[in-house]
Image (spheres, rainbow, N blue to C red):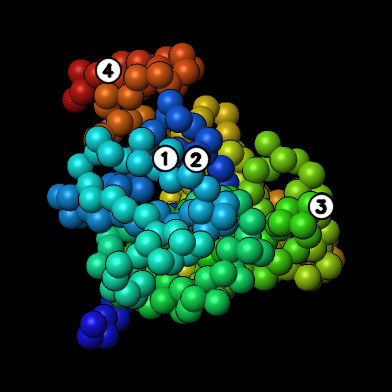
Amino acid sequence: MSPQAVVPIEERLIFAMGGGGFTMEPNNPLLDDYVLSLVRATEPKILFLPTASGDTTHQINAFKARFAHRTCVHEHVSLFRMHEIGRPLREIVMEQDIVYVGGGSMRNLLAIWQAHGLDELLVEAWQSGIVLAGLSAGAMCWFQGGVTRSSGPPEVLAGLGLLEGSLTVHADGEPERLPVWLAAVRSGELPGGWALDDGVGLLFRGKQLERAVSSRPGAGAQRVDAIAGELVRHRLDPELLLGEGPSKALGGLDEAVEELRRVHRLRRGMGRGRG
């Protein structure tokens, strides 16, 4: 397969989720539909990498259930079952529009990727304009570092460094991660970065944060940096996704989201009435 053209950095996208998507929100497709909306293709190709979970059947089936009835071409690659892959790994990755990485063990994820050369291949994919997305371990891996629970207690771990700064996930669901991350940022062990609640996603264009979104009312995020040994925090208020596009036929979302949608529609209608 010939080398891919390198696209300008401002055209490269990474979408990092603190938690959510099809593995955590089976009745809420907002984040996953947003992932599909990041490419212009009428039938985008999306590849799921469930490496961090050990390629569990549960994650793979959840991925298929979410994307099987959407306008896309979906497939997955199980590095633990390479004998089932009938094509070169590079060929599979480089023909995608989106690579979506699941959660689990960030330490195991990076080690297995390195063993198969997939870490370098994903860098090449990003440089060629393929959208990289992921949640939990699949989000932290793109940054300079994060806080993993791969060995049990939360601990600092270096990532691939495509994005500058650090990331910690599940800030509301696994709050024991946050103090470890804050201490690492304060000491300089990790660079400043972001802490995300479940349901929150950050979209990076190149290396710059472009948009913060959420699939859950009330979910938040914060940016934290260390200045002269003191932590400086800035709260981010993500934009609540309201189901534009594929998510219009949602079904099963909680009543709070539906109520916010109703209010949003009313406000848009009032705005049009005022001209």
Residue lying at the far left of the rendered structure? 42
Q: Nearer the viewer, residue 76 or 2?
A: 76
Q: Quadrant of the C terminus?
A: top left
Please report whichever mark, 4 or 2, sits nearer to the chain's N-terminal start.
2
What label sits on residue 153 in the rendered view? Answer: 3
Q: Which residue is mark 2?
A: 58
Location of residue 102 in the rendering, given as x and y in whole percent from the top left corner: 50, 51
**Residue at left offset 61%, top offset 46%:** 196
Q: Tell me the mark number nearer the camera, choosing from 4 and 1.
A: 1
Question: Residue 33's quadrant in the figure?
Answer: top left
Q: Tell me the mark number nearer the camera, choosing from 3 and 4.
A: 3
Mark 1 vs mark 3, CA separation in Å: 29 Å
Q: What amino acid is at disc 2?
A: His
Q: What amino acid is at disc 3?
A: Pro
Q: Tell me the mark number nearer the camera, choosing from 1 and 3.
A: 1
Location of residue 227 in the rendering, given as x and y in whole percent from the top left corner: 77, 66
Location of residue 237 in the rendering, given as x and y in whole percent from the top left corner: 54, 40
What label sits on residue 270 in the rendered view? Answer: 4
Q: Quadrant of the N terminus?
A: bottom left
**Residue at left offset 77%, top offset 57%:** 151
Mark 4 vs mark 2, CA separation in Å: 45 Å
